Image (tube, rainbow, N blue to C red):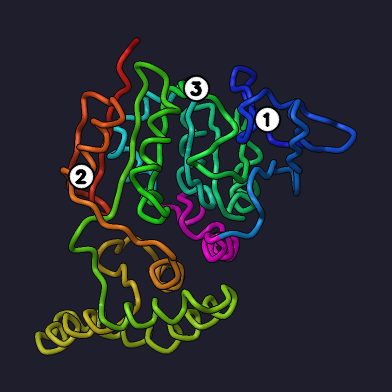
Amino acid sequence: MISGVKKDVQLICPIHKKKLEYNEKENRFICQNKCSFSIINNIPRFVPYKNYADSFGLQWNTYKQTQLDSFTKTTISQDRLKRLLGGTFEILQGKDVLEAGCGAGRFTEILLQNGANVFSVDLSAAVEANYDNCKMYQNYFVCQADITNLPVSSDTFDLVICIGVIQHTPDPEKTIDALSSYVKPGGLLVIDHYTYGYPETPSRKILHAILTRMPPQFSMSFVKYLTNILWPIHKYMRSQKQNNWIKKGRTIFLNISPLVDYHDAYPQLQDEQLKTWAMLDTHDTLTDHYKHLRTSSEIQNQLLKCGMENIQIALAGNGIEAKANKPLK
């Protein structure tokens, strides 16, 4: 049994672009050119299970519920997604949505809760966490695939959304071009991207150079160990924020420590949640193989090259947030 895909989203071979047929006996998809794509743990696989995004796969299966609003009992993910969509979820109802780079499903569950028909994709084994978190929803499909070469045709989705992903791909411009191609004429593309000024302490740069050369499991264990050592200092300094000397010392410490500290950004999180988020996002920033930076004008120019219109760009969130429409034919 695999997650349900909406009938009018036809799967195609990512190599030959021919229609895929489901072989129930072998539990796999097959194209007329004899390409075969396995279904493992109820999830179709269109790329090798192991790839450059392995660290992300391990990360999201380790912290599969950490950033889900349904787990944290906050609206952190909801607020971010709503801002990216222009302040409303009304545009999601009944729409075919491609979520490119779905991770564990922090945004997937919100898209589904607001009536979207969601086609979620990730290059990594994070799809397994996503499936575990969202398999109870109708009109939900998830697969492991390369977002620059998906098993779908061009002009397929009313909305293509890609959050926290493009900067981690080998070629951001190629990724934006591919994402634009999946949007239906008149449809909407929503993306974000790191920009210059992204916070990187010297210790993060050093550890990043080391940990990206290590096996993912070692890096995960190391970050947990590091967080357990440094987090009590982070927590104590935050608790003493009324003390001017400690407040000044904390500013210096935050520019030295490799940990990602959300005490100021997300005060609504409980103490243990803050520590877990620190582990998750410290691992994220220390183990990504690609961390590209782009300016607003570079993102705008690329969207123009892709033939998009009504381009809106803002400096927000993790850097640059942008949305654009594909012109009607």
The residues colored magenta run 52-74
In x, y percent, where is residue 99? 48, 38
Residue at horizontal 42%, vertical 53%?
169
- Mark 2 surroundings within 10 Å by alpha-carbon count, few (fewer than 14), some (14 through 19), many (20 or more): few
Q: CA distance from mark 2 to mark 3?
A: 26 Å
- Outermost residue, right direction? 25
- Give the residue pinned by disc 1: 4
- Outermost residue, top direction? 329
Residue at horizontal 25%, vertical 43%?
321
- Give the residue pinned by disc 2: 298
As drawn, is 249 to the left or to the right of 65?
left
Residue 194 image-quadrant placement: bottom left
Q: Earlier in the sequence, mark 2 or mark 3?
A: 3
Residue at horizontal 52%, vertical 33%?
112
- Give the residue pinned by disc 3: 156
As drawn, is 96 to the left or to the right of 236?
right
- Identify the amino acid type marked 2: Glu
In x, y percent, where is residue 307? 28, 25
Tags 2 and 1 touching, CB below 8 Å: no
- Mark 3 surroundings within 10 Å by alpha-carbon count, few (fewer than 14), some (14 through 19), many (20 or more): many
